[in-house]
Image (tube, helix red, strand yellow):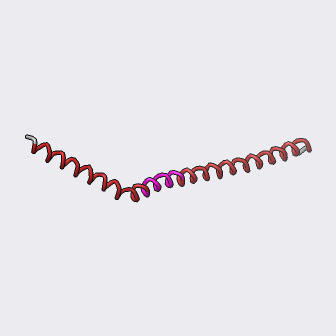
Amino acid sequence: MDPESKELLQATLELAQENNKMLHSMKRSMQMSRIMSYVYWAFIIGSALGAYYFVQPYIDQLLDAYGGTVDTINIIRSFGR
């Protein structure tokens, strides 16, 4: 092989190795992005479920109070007839 071809082949090899490093870096970045996206959505869904767990007794109290109010109003209406 003549020196010019050898030099061109060496430059091509270096460029291919550099591209390979960049592609691996991009792949690693995409994987981390995907993992962080899963963690993000797990946090959002988990915090919503946790908030419901802590707020549920208050919601039950409000529903009971509403049901009692509706029953009282129906009793008052039945006396008026």
Q: Is residue 53 magenta?
A: no
User: 2 or 49, which is in the foreground?
Assistant: 49
Left-right relation of 71 to 53: left
Percent position of residue 35, x then y:
57, 54
Q: Residue at x 54, y 55 (%)?
A: 39
User: 42 or 74, which is in the foreground?
Assistant: 74
Instruction: Examine the rendered structure and indicate whether residue 8 appears above or below residue 61.
Output: above
Magenta part, dominant SS: helix
Percent position of residue 13, x then y:
80, 47
Q: Residue at x 61, y 53 (%)?
A: 32
* Number of numbered tags placed on the structure image: 0
Q: Is residue 47 magenta?
A: yes
Left-right relation of 29 to 8: left
Left-right relation of 17 to 26: right
Residue projecting furthest to the front:
80
Percent position of residue 9, x then y:
83, 45
Q: Residue at x 31, y 52 (%)?
A: 62
The region drawn magenta spans 40-50
Query: Is the C terminus in the top left, top right, bottom left or bottom right quadrant?
Result: top left
Left-right relation of 81 to 6: left
User: 11 or 23, which is in the foreground?
Assistant: 23
Percent position of residue 79, x then y:
9, 45
The answer to which quarter of the image holds residue 55 is bottom left
User: 11 or 71, which is in the foreground?
Assistant: 71
Residue projecting furthest to the right:
3
